Image (tube, rainbow, N blue to C red):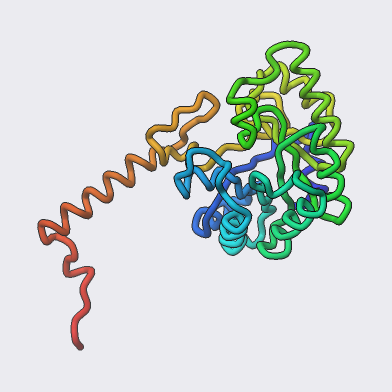
Amino acid sequence: MTVAKIMSLKNREKIVMLTAYDYLTAKILDELKIDIILVGDTAGMVYAGYKNTLPITMDEMIYHARAVRRGAPGSFIIGDMPFLSYGTSIEESVRNAGRFLKEAKADAVKLEGGTALSQVISAIASVGIPVMGHIGLKPQSIHRFGHSIAGKNDSETEELIKDARAIEKAGAFAFVIEGTTEEAAREVTEKISIPAIGIGAGRYTDGQVLVITDMLGLDKDVNFKHNKKYADLYGIIKSSVSNYAGEVKSGIFPSEEQVFHRQ
């Protein structure tokens, strides 16, 4: 998968994107040839236990991105730029974006923001780093905008279109559109020439992305409306660990099958 191939899928084939944060998960996604693997800043929540995505650092994101690359050597991997790793200055934004490619061998970066971040996107793209934008609900701006759904009326939809056009003009090859009404996301998708990857944005975007721990049901407390649970890993892991503990206590494990003997 390449930037050119991803862009060519618009209006032709739905794009599949999933998050990954570790070697073993990445291996599975690589075997399945998932279109895009996003090393999301959600790692701060689902792996580090932070309340939101804000505390995770560049060093932590590089660690996760390296692990994912080792597990998925043939996949298109995007590194999610964490809060305050961009936007403070053009120079720092470009430098941090470059770290994902130099240190983690990622293929591209993603950053949140529309019109206000167009100069940053342009600067990063101008040095040869592919950039995916992110509009609509922006988790890194939770303290400013909260979790309200965007695109509830014509005015909000126009703002989304304005943001999408700005990042398209700045050189982004695609963008995530998150937490919007289906009607707004459809209008944005149809009016912008680069692919729109939806999460909580309805059925008419160019592709979809989910947090892999959410769609696999690893956290019993996650019940987001936009998410579909394709498995119950929480239940499977809990049952398996319970069975293991019971067998150790009762002496069933290890059995003859799991022990070594002198020749």
- Residue drawn at point x = 46 percent, y = 36 percent: 230
Q: Residue furthest front?
A: 88
- Residue drawn at point x = 56 percent, y = 41 percent: 53
Q: Residue furthest left?
A: 250
| Quarter of the figure with residue 179 | top right
Residue 159 to residue 102: above or below:
above
Question: How far from the left and from the top, in percent, is residue 137?
Answer: 65, 28
Count of residue discs: 0
Does residue 76 appear left or right of residue 244 in this picture?
A: right
The residue nearer to you, when weighing 160 against 23, is 160
Q: Quadrant of the C terminus?
A: bottom left
Question: How far from the left and from the top, in percent, is residue 200?
Answer: 60, 27
| Quarter of the figure with residue 184 | top right
Residue 103 to residue 2: above or below:
below
Q: Residue furthest top?
A: 153
Does residue 167 appear left or right of residue 232 in this picture?
A: right
The residue nearer to you, when weighing 113 against 216, is 113
Does residue 198 appear left or right of residue 235 in this picture?
A: right
The residue nearer to you, when weighing 249 against 127, is 127
The residue nearer to you, when weighing 200 against 16, is 200
Question: How far from the left and from the top, in percent, is residue 11?
Answer: 79, 31
